[in-house]
Structures are given as C-alpha cells and as structure tokens.
Amino acid sequence: MIKKWWKEQVVYQIYPRSFYDSNNDGIGDIKGIILKLDYLKLLGIDIIWISPHFDSPNDDNGYDIRNYKKVMEEFGSMQDFDQLLKEVHIRKMKLIIDLVVNHTSDEHDWFIESKSSQNNKFRDYYIWKEGDKKNPPNNWTSFFGGSAWKKDLISNDYYLHYFSKKQPDLNWENNKVRKEVHELMKFWLEKGIDGFRMDVIPFISKDQDFNNLSKKELLNPEKVYASGPRLHEFLKEMNSKVLSKYDIVSIGEAFGISKDTMIKLSDEREEELDLVFLFDIVRIGRDNWIQNKWNLVQLKKLFKTQSNVDEFHWPTVFLNNHDNPRSVSKYGNDKDYRIKSAKLLAMLTLTQRGTPVLYQGEEIGMTNHNFDNLSQFDDLEVLGNLDKAMGSGISKKDYITHLNNTSRDHSRTTMQWSSGTKGGFSNGNNNWFLSNPNHDRINVENDLNNEDSIFHFYRKLLQIRKQSKDLIYGDYLDLDPNHQNIFMYQRVGLKTTYLMILNMSDSSINYNFDNLMEYSLEFSNRNTKPRISSKHIELLAWDALMFKK
C-alpha cells in the first residue's frame, strides 16, 4: 500500500456560516474560524475543510456560486482568507475548500450571458433544451422539488437544474467549461490550499439522450444522474491537467454512485480522485425525508463493504456532515446516554480503516434540534419538497415529525461554544439561524473544563490513532457481523492487533468471547474496568472498549 499524509490524518468540516461570528452580525465568518484554530489544534485536527466561502447570493447557503474568485462579503475578504490559510499552515495543519462545479448561481456572469441570447458565446456553458409544447424537455426532477427544468421566458428554452432553479447546471460537454474549471482550481491551488472536496461531482456528466426516467428511476433519480457516460473521462482529464501537479488531496462527494463506480473513482491506478464520500452509512434507513428503522447488522455490513477494499483504495469514514442530521441523535441515544453514546461513536469513527472526517459540534455531542413548525426551517429543500410530501398523503405535522429525524438543518444550527446567549456563537442581536436551546449544558466551554468530557475523549483517541500506524493501516475484520447489539471488530497490523467491542444498545449484555484474556484494555468510555473472565465480558449500556495485543 502507498502511504499518504491524507490517509493518516483527520479532517474537520467547518460550516462557516454557523461556526463563529467575529463581528457580531449574526453570521459566522473567516475571522471567526481563525480565532478558533487553536481549539482545533488542541483537539488534534490535521485537515480543516471549509464549506463554500465564495461570493454567493445564498439561495442554497453558498452552494450557488456567483464568483469563484471572490470571498463572500458576509464571510470577509480575500485578505481574510489568505490570513486563514497562513494561520492554518503556521499550526502545521492543512486547509481544503469546496469545489462546486456541477452548477453555478444563476447570478454568475456566465449564466447572465448565457440566457441573454441563443447566439451568445456563453450559451453552451449551460444545458438548454426546447420543450415539447408546454412541457419541459423530459421528466427529470430536482432534488429540491418539482421539475429539474426551468423555462426562460425570453427564449422559451429550458435550462437544467438538478438543485434549485437558481443553480443552473454547467455543460461539461463544452471543453471551454472544463478549461474554466481547471483555471479556477489552479487559482486556489497557487494560493497554497491543500485540496478540494468536490460537491456532487458524479453529476457533472449528463446522458446526452435526455430520455425520460422510469417510475422506478424517479424514486431515486440520483442513481441516474450519477452514472453519466463521460464522468471518468472528465475526472482523468482534471487529474492530468491539475490535480497531479500538486501534493494535495481530492475528495469527491459521491451521492448516488454504485459500489463499482466508487471503486473506480478512488482506484489509485485510475488517477481520478483520492477519496470519495459514500452515503450508504449516513443515509441508512433514509427514503427522501423519511427515516425508516434500521438495525446494527445492516450498519455493520455497510462498514465491512466500505473497509474491505484492496490496497489500491482508501475509504473515508464519517457519520455526520452539513447535509445530514446529528450523529448522536441517529446512531446513539441523545437523551439517556448522550455522553456515553457520543464517545462510542467517536471510537467507531476513529478506529475504522480510512480517513476520518468529523463535523463541527460532533466532538461535544451536539444533538438534533426539535423543530415545531415549518417556518423554523432554513433549508430550501424542506419547502421545495412540501408539495411532494403532501401529495404522498401525510400531514404537515407528520412531515415535521419526519424532518425532525432527517433535515439538513439539524447540522446547521449554530456552534455551541458556551452556555451564554445563543451558545456563545455571536454577541449580535439576530443570528442567521437557530441555536439549539440545549447549549446551556452542551457546549465547548463545559467540555474543555471536564477531563471526562466528549471533547477530551475525542482528543485522547486522536492521540492514540496518530501514534499507531497499525491502527491506521491494519486490516479490518468484523468478528460478529450478525449480533443485533454488539459491534466487535479487529484492526490487525504488522505488530499490534486492536480489538474494539461496542455495545450499541441501552441494555447490559454478558457477552461471550473466548480469548479476551490475550488482550489488555487500552481505552474505554467507562469509569470502571469491565469484569472479564476467560469466557465472557460484562458490557454496560453503550460501552465502548478498545483492547490491544
């Protein structure tokens, strides 16, 4: 296996708008991130990934980019970004940024020109099609509700938008578009950034037949959108002309792809991307806005699929990000065992095979927010899918009940720094979004002052991980894949074997395991040592135990 720095380090995602407000306007900013770099260094973070910081009208919180070479005014200036990059590197950390190039904002100069005339030289930068009388070109749907086509009243043509109507999709068939993308990537790489996380990158290649989707395909259109015929060609070109010229990491957000596509995208021999984000684990049990029941056996199978790849592939490991609800509220017990289950999830994430990616607030066990009505939500996906939800026969009350388990807004509430007003995120009068009321007890200040906190558990685990190449590169073996409550796996290295035993339930369990006496207890989330005999171990609710031999 080829060893790389990004295989051995840990990523921390920052959603700038919600992280820390330095100027009290209610919006997180770049200077706010700079002020918290020492906190991240103390935690043990190596790589910081910031969600889009580019100039944007904020229809989709920065994922609709108006100017790729300008910083969003609410976040600061290019000088602030340069200072952030400098301060990150001074602390011997790395900085990666979002690359959002499946689409732009409809306020981008390219699109303004494109829609001005059918003969404009930028017309072919986007995907324009004639409709059929009063209907759009096909039945493709947007992830934010309704048709994926928007009619332009001047030309009577339709443009394609997989997401918001203010996010027109770029036409990657046009080599001028690809050159523009390569040029803007070089702009940021020459500044010294350490890589890109590439937003919905499998969607850049479109099936040029533009055929209607079948009823089955309409249930999960992302599988069609992610299987365009020229995806690998486009990524190989990007790698050859840009990525391969720098010592950086490239991470593709790979929503909708198959396992086979994942394997090809991240195969070192293919020279496309270094890492991909697979969504099978974070979306287990999900069906659009509905969270169905799932079980541990299913989850373990997904981890096994993700981890048991050959030496030419390297996985990513994450349970939370800006597009998914809080991990402790989904995989743990955020009421009776919040602290203990959050520590268990820390051990699960940081002892898997792959590069771990943490999300802001995960390290203190931030939970889902309890939303009471639709007006509290900020995410345009919520209102965009309202008609579809109502059409399925559920009430608004039921829709909100589902959203309280699935909405992206749970991860976008403001970071909880202290028990003070609005969780210490800002001293301004009006924050851009809600602060979870439980910030009075769940906050960074409390965790820093408590050696037994979730924060310090993450910190100690990160130290253990950094000190052991066997824990990073060792083989992954699930020792009891069919147990309904216990997740037990080994990481088998050249010198050391680690054994993790996780009780992912509210019940105590007397668990049989014959050769546990061969191991020594390295780390756990218990205050007392577990009772171990030659044949079994007594596990308490949400126990997370790391052994080694």
Image: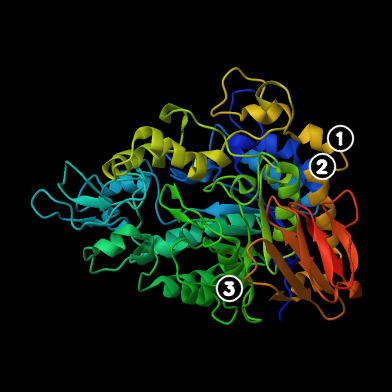
Horizontal and vertical percent for residue 257? Answer: 45, 67
Sort mark 2 into few (<14), some (14-19) or many (20+) by Cα contacts within 10 Å: many
User: Is 308 on the left or on the right of 285, as rendered?
Assistant: right
- Three-letter residue code for mark 2: Ser
Q: Residues within 10 Å of mark 1 (few under 14, many from 20)?
A: few
Which circle's residue, 3 or 1, is located before the other in the chain?
3
Quadrant of image for the C terminus: bottom right
Q: Amino acid at mark 3?
A: Thr
- Which one is in front, 521 or 99? 521
Write down the residue under mark 2: 453
The residue sitting at 89% across, 68% down in the picture is: 533
Is the residue under label 1 in contact with that under label 3 (CB below 8 Å)? Answer: no
Residue 433 lies, with reference to residue 109, above or below; the image says above
State the quadrant of the N terminus.
bottom right
- Looking at the image, is mark 2 or mark 3 earlier in the sequence? 3
Residue 507 x/y as whole percent: 71, 52
Contact (Cβ within 8 Å) of mark 1 with mark 2: yes
- What residue is disc 3 on? 305
Kindly give the residue lying farthest to the left in the view shown. Answer: 133
